[in-house]
Structures are given as structure tokens and as C-alpha cells.
Amino acid sequence: MYRTTVQIDGMMCSMCESHVNDAIRNTLQIKKVSSSHKKNTAEIISEEPVSEAELHRALDDTGYRIISVTSEEYRKKGLFSR
């Protein structure tokens, strides 16, 4: 699994977060997405790495601007994880 963090310019409220989340969900094969207008980020959990080009394809028409993209391997932490 991978965690991709996207710095996004233009989110001003919780409705903006919903627009970003919907655009990402409807375009990419992901497990989870969570956005924060206060931090100007979206965090994506996916089975495969998400490329910057895929994110541009998902968000360019929404009016929000991608500033940076970072990705790392993600290991879910929980009661029964190793």
C-alpha cells in the first residue's frame, strides 16, 4: 500500500475538500482519500503508487492547483498488524 500526500492550492472550506475528494475518487483507483483545507493537503491511500500525472488529470479541471506530490510506502497500524 502507498500513502500519497498532495499539497493543493485553492481549497477554502469543507465543500472544497468534498470536491477534491470526489474528483480523486471518481478518477483514480484508491482505497481512501482525505482532504484538509486548513493544511491544504489531500492524503490518498492506494494499492499502487499514484503518479503526479494522474493527479493532474483528476484535479486540473476543478480549479485547484497541485503544488507538490510525495509518496511513500504505507503500512496500516492497528491492533493486529505486525
Image (cartoon, rainbow, N blue to C red):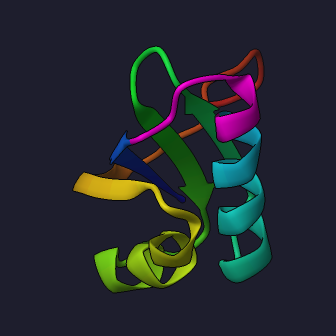
Residue at 63%, 23% (x, y): give it. 13
Q: Position of residue 45 (x, y in %)?
A: 59, 52
Where is 40 relative to 45, above or below?
above
Left/right placement of residue 62 relative to residue 81 reads left
Residue at 76%, 42% (x, y): give it. 18
The one nearer the camera, 56 or 13, is: 13
Where is 78 relative to 65, above or below?
above
Where is 41 relative to 2, above or below?
above
The quarter of the image holding the N terminus is bottom right
Q: Position of residue 6 (x, y in %)?
A: 37, 48
From where the camera sits, is residue 2 visible? yes
Q: Quadrant of residue 17?
A: top right
The one nearer the camera, 75 or 44, is: 44
The quarter of the image holding the C terminus is top right
The one nearer the camera, 81 or 1, is: 1
Left/right placement of residue 31 relative to residue 43 reads right
Q: Quadrant of residue 51?
A: bottom left
Q: How many marks?
A: 0
Residue at 71%, 24% (x, y): give it. 14
Q: Position of residue 78 (x, y in %)?
A: 70, 20
Residue at 65%, 38% (x, y): give it. 16
Left/right placement of residue 20 relative to residue 2 reads right
Left/right placement of residue 48 relative to residue 81 reads left
The one nearer the camera, 12 or 68, is: 12
- Taking the magenta stretch, the answer to whether it contains residue 12 is yes
- Taking the magenta stretch, the answer to whether it contains residue 59 is no
From where the camera sits, is residue 32 visible? no
Query: Which region is colored magenta?
Result: 10-16
